[in-house]
Amino acid sequence: MFPGLFTLATFFFFWLAYPYHVYNQEQFQLFQFSWRYLAETLAVPGGLADWCGRFLTQFFYYSAAGSFILALLLAAIQLSTAALAKNLSPTGYALTFIPPVLLLVFFCDADAMPGTLVAILLSLLCALAVIRIRPAVLRNIVAVVATALLYFLLGSLSILFIIAFLAHERKLLPGLMMGIVFALCVVCLHKTMGYPYYRLLYGINYYRFHHHLPVWPWAAAAAEALVLMIAPCIKRQGKVWEGIGAFGAILVLGALGVVLAYDGEKETYFKYDFLTRRFQWNAILAEARKDNPQKPFEMASVNLALVKTGNAHRMFEFYQNGPDGLLPKYTNDYLHPLIPSEAYFQLGMVNASQRYTFEAQELIPDFQKSVRAYKRLAETNLVNRNYQVAEKYLKALEKTLFYRSWAKSKMALCGNDEAIDADPGYGYLRSVRLHDHDFLFNRQAMETMLGYLVQENPANHMALEYLLAWNLLDKNLKGFVNYCPFEAYSGGVPRCYQEAFLLDFANTTQSLENVPAFINPAVVTSFSLFMQERGGGTPAETLAKRFGNTYWYYYFYRLGQ
């Protein structure tokens, strides 16, 4: 019953509470079914565990599958521990859940790698296999040889193989020989491959960042050693309720650890990033109404969704944090440039999108390639007519499981200008990208770049809406009024545009007389009331209740005046 409850609890935690962490793992690797990829992965200490972890990670494409895999790996570690300890009391059996609970806390970190679980599980399973060898001498010889082999295949967590074997044998000499072999492996690999000792001792690919070494995997390994040594010594006549109590206490402490380790801020960002990647614009807006996001990259996703659904004029119904919430500044990491890259791609700024995507991929801390980045780089090179470069990315994607069919369909476009021009997506991007005013990307001149897009391609309505939004968020009323085609709105000028125009009109003329006909009288009345209350010293919090969704409130109370 205990393993079943633990597996279900773990599965539902990842599936319901942490699904976007699961998705995030999948997009930052490019697992290929090729001998070359296998050889490159196995060439690194711990390569087999890493290769198996990457193989499983590709199924994180579906959050339910990824959650199930993580739950099964953790449950398998517990069952292997119980099998190694043997004949446990109820309390001793409950203690075997401590290592997987610690590992569960570890996997609340988005940069924890599934290969860690594989390394621990395979170490325990190999120990189970070796201790079943009957002749003691042969068993000891196999154990010593396996120590060296497992270190190279599984990494430093293969030390659990030694610990499990010692816990079963209870003899010093085999353990001493295995320890010497383990140490020699570390020294030899340091001398021959140049890895620092701290990485060889911690593990090369257990964590995405190589300069940061979380304690959780080794805390789990230490707990594993203690359980294997202590649990069999607990009296076997213990009562069942004692085991249930110990199991409950471990789960409660584990739940507390998960709550403390839970990274809700990253989960929220991963959610908007995932929905942006899948073009689920309406879902983004639905989530934003619930979450009220305020971080620039999340707002960039929301504003992109507003434009793509034809609701750019409703942007001030959401919290806005300036131009950074429309097209955020470039950040030197592997996560955040991907949402701006999507916005630039949709706008027709293909080269900017390609740059953001490529640099994000090159900044992945464990030097893997990204299947998401490969897809986008293939697309930008197709649009740019760099067919040989596009083929390089597509050939790699053809060796994957979930992206093979997509890559094959795009490979048919390589070298076929007519087919790409006829494609509703790529053909459109070719038609709206800049031709006469090509430029080196300069975020400080974003208004100019967006203006060129509109000037060369009046049909690029998305560029126009981004240009207007940029000026509004930058509080550049003159630029907004200069670019906004007020008379072109046959169904009436959107309210937030009327509000911005009216504010500029009042600043210019110091009067609300003779406002243009496209300004609704109700907007004029509302503006007069807002300015009257603001001038009367009404607190911003009070004004927010009535005017929080207006451009006027944003102009005067967001990011300073």
Image (cartoon, helix red, strand yellow):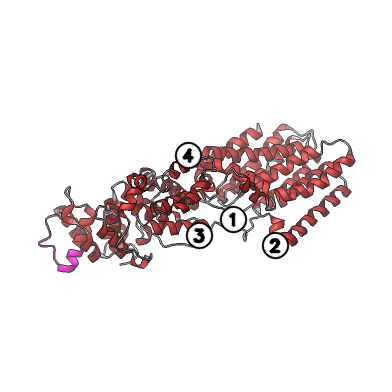
Q: Residue at x 71, y 36 (%)?
A: 242
Q: Secondary structure at mark 4?
A: helix
Instruction: Give the residue pinned by disc 4.
Output: 405
Front: mark 2 or 4: 4
Residue drawn at the location 19% of the way across and 52% of the way down: 493
Counting other residues with Cα less than 10 Å from the Cα at mark 3, is it few (<14), some (14-19), or many (20 or more)?
Answer: some
Label 4: how many residues lie within 10 Å, few (<14), some (14-19) or many (20+)?
Answer: some
| Disc 4 residue type (three-letter) | Ser
Viewer-proximal residue, 195 or 407? Answer: 407
Q: In what element is the residue under mark 2?
A: loop
Q: Nearer the viewer, mark 3 or mark 4?
A: 4
Residue 525 appearing in the image: no
Task: List the residue tagged with mark 2.
Answer: 196
Cα distance between the residues tagged 3 and 4:
30 Å
Determine which residue is flagged by label 1.
366
Q: Which mark is residue 333?
A: 3
Q: Amino acid at mark 2?
A: Pro
* In the depicted structure, whether residue 497 falls above or below residue 138: below
Which one is earlier in the sequence, the residue at label 2 or at label 4?
Answer: 2
